[in-house]
Amino acid sequence: MNGKKFYSTGALFADIVPVVALDDDKTVIVFVNRHTPGLNIIDDWSGMGQRTTASGTTIIENIEVEERDILRHYLAFEEQTTIGAVAQIIHAAVDVGIARAAYKDAIHFIRNYTRPWIETDFEHGYEEPLIIYGVGEISVKLHAAEALLKRAGEFIDRAFQEQTPTSATEASIAVAEAKAFADEACIFITNKFFELSGTKSTLEQFNHHRHWRNARTHTLHDPVRWKYINVGNYYLNGVNPPRHGAF
């Protein structure tokens, strides 16, 4: 096996590294011991966010593969399954988690540090109507993202119980909806944070920019624009979503 993979999340921490490969043009997963000769993981991840994920580059040079180490991944996609939905709901949950952390920090900062605009007579920032309005916005978006995430989890649970292609398809669509909105809510909240909190919130001592950096980086994991395409095609034209691990 030969190849090179940029953005190999967690590989530096792993004892066993799963490698997606092609075997006669069919996708397989090969499990490789971290210390196998020919496997080189470089600590070169310099992304602005997700800095502790150890997402370095993996270089694979002439690694001998044993049959016992091969998982024939393509078999999971011969019909609609929940593999993609399970993989994607994890990423949706990460985005919602970032949004929730930023929201919590925003409330704390506004309550303790933010000052009202000079054209008002308020003593505290948390009394200013436009700040209150903004907090209302991020509250609604966070709670909507959480609700869609919970709904997607329920669809996955149902698909596990029913074990049918239809239920698996419905789970994939529900997760895609949750992922698409979590992406938007996450970026909106982590950005709105600074607008509502004021200049002081950008000081390095608070490290609040980590929320936006993590959100902006993680939401690039797979293009949300294709979530909307596939969701729309499903509801409008009855076209089932693609069968792969990213949906």
Image: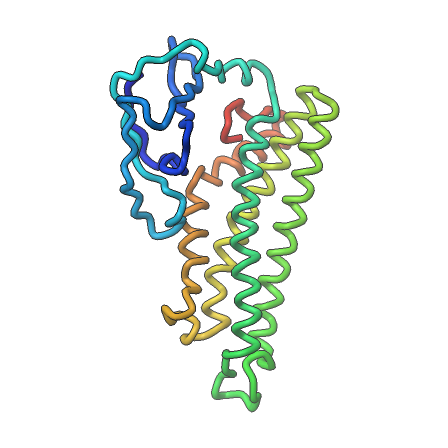
- Determine whether, in the image, residue 18 is placed left or right of residue 145: left
- Where residue 20 sits: x, y (%)? 40, 22
Q: How far from the left and from the top, in percent, is residue 232? A: 58, 35
- 22 versus 210 height, above or below: above
Residue shown at the point (49%, 83%) measured from the top left = 117
Where is residue 83, by image quadrant?
top right
Image quarter in which the N terminus is found: top left
97 relative to 204, above or below: above
- Residue nearest the observer in this picture, 190 or 70: 70
Across and down, in percent, residue 197 comes to: 49, 73
Residue at 25% in and 21% down: 61
- Looking at the image, is 116 positioned above or below residue 61? below
Looking at this rendering, what residue extends furthest in the bottom direction?
121
Q: Is residue 154 left or right of residue 115?
A: right
Q: Out of 149 and 204, give the one closest to the viewer.
A: 204
In-image side of 153 versus 242 (left or right): right
Report the residue at 41% width, 76% height from top. 200
Q: Could you say which is closer to the camera, residue 74 or residue 196?
A: 74
Q: Quadrant of residue 58?
A: top left
Classify residue 172 by image quadrant: top right
- Number of marks present in the image shown: 0
Colour mode of the rendering: rainbow
Pick the residue in front: 129 or 235: 129
| Residue drawn 66% across the image and 20% down it | 165
